[in-house]
Image (cartoon, rainbow, N blue to C red):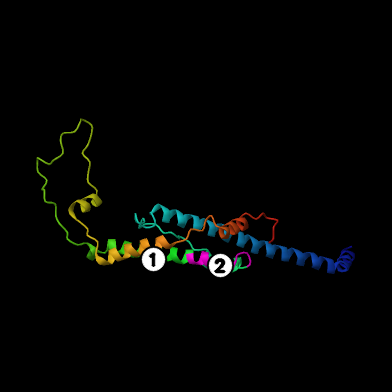
Amino acid sequence: MILKFIQSLNQFYGFITLVVGGVAVYLYLKQKRDHKRDAARLIVQEIRYAEEQIRSSGRGGRGYALSSKLLPTNSWNDNIHLFTKDLKEIETDMISEFYSKATYIDSLITERSQQKINPKFFANTQPMTQPLTSATAQPDLPIGSSPQQSTPQQTIQMTMTQIPTPGELMTMQILIEVSSSVEFLYNTPAVDKLRKISEHKWYQLT
């Protein structure tokens, strides 16, 4: 029985090989499609988030949060080759320029943070001119309440006056200039194409 079964398989060897090869090709194309879809989804999200940060900062005029980045991740540089057939050259250039400027802004934010942290950028340190006396002490509080304690950060702000150095002023000026030159892309045809790719269904291989 086993021999007959093996002989019957041999008769369909070509068909079985074709089926296995077809499945392998399908899985390869699906994996490639899924990777492209996920990359497009991340790129759209990164562009949206970066634009939101630039808007919130007033194009750099109100400053950026030193603890955050416009691009916590950068999916465009690693996956640009996946979208060369979907995007026009000018659209590819626009997205590349957006990422380039956002990356540069992140480097300036890092530089600004280092300038704030480095003690040599604290100038004209002045102690408090009014000592803490009974006249300036807190008034009596209701029973059950407790006086508020000053945090270390508040103490530093009370005892130090920070004057921006020329280097800091230059960094802030460049931040404003670069932020003002960023072209928003989230509602452009280029990002619309990426958004459609990110919404591809599982059965779509292209």
Disc on res. 107: 1
Please give the name of the residue rendered at 68% of the width and 65% of the height, measured from the top-left corner.
28
Whether residue 93 appears in magenta in the rendering, the answer is yes
Identify the residue position indicated by label 2 in the image: 90
**Image side of residue 147 versus residue 199, left or right:** left
Disc 2 secondary structure class: helix
Q: Position of residue 55 (x, y in %)?
A: 42, 53
Q: Position of residue 140 (x, y in %)?
A: 16, 34
Q: Position of residue 16 (x, y in %)?
A: 82, 65
Left or right: where does residue 57 sit relative to residue 49? left
Left or right: where 107 falls relative to 185: left
Q: Residue at x 67, y 55 (%)?
A: 202
Is the stretch drawn in magenta largely helix, strand or loop? helix
Work out whether 106 lies above or below 142. below
Q: Nearer the viewer, mark 1 or mark 2?
A: 2
What distance separates the C-alpha of mark 1 from that of mark 2? 26 Å
Q: Residue at x 79, y 64 (%)?
A: 19
Q: Is residue 79 visible?
A: no
Q: Which is nearer the N-term, disc 1 or disc 2?
A: 2
Magenta stretch: give its range.
Answer: 85-97
Mark 2 belongs to which amino acid? Ile
The quadrant holding residue 1 is: bottom right
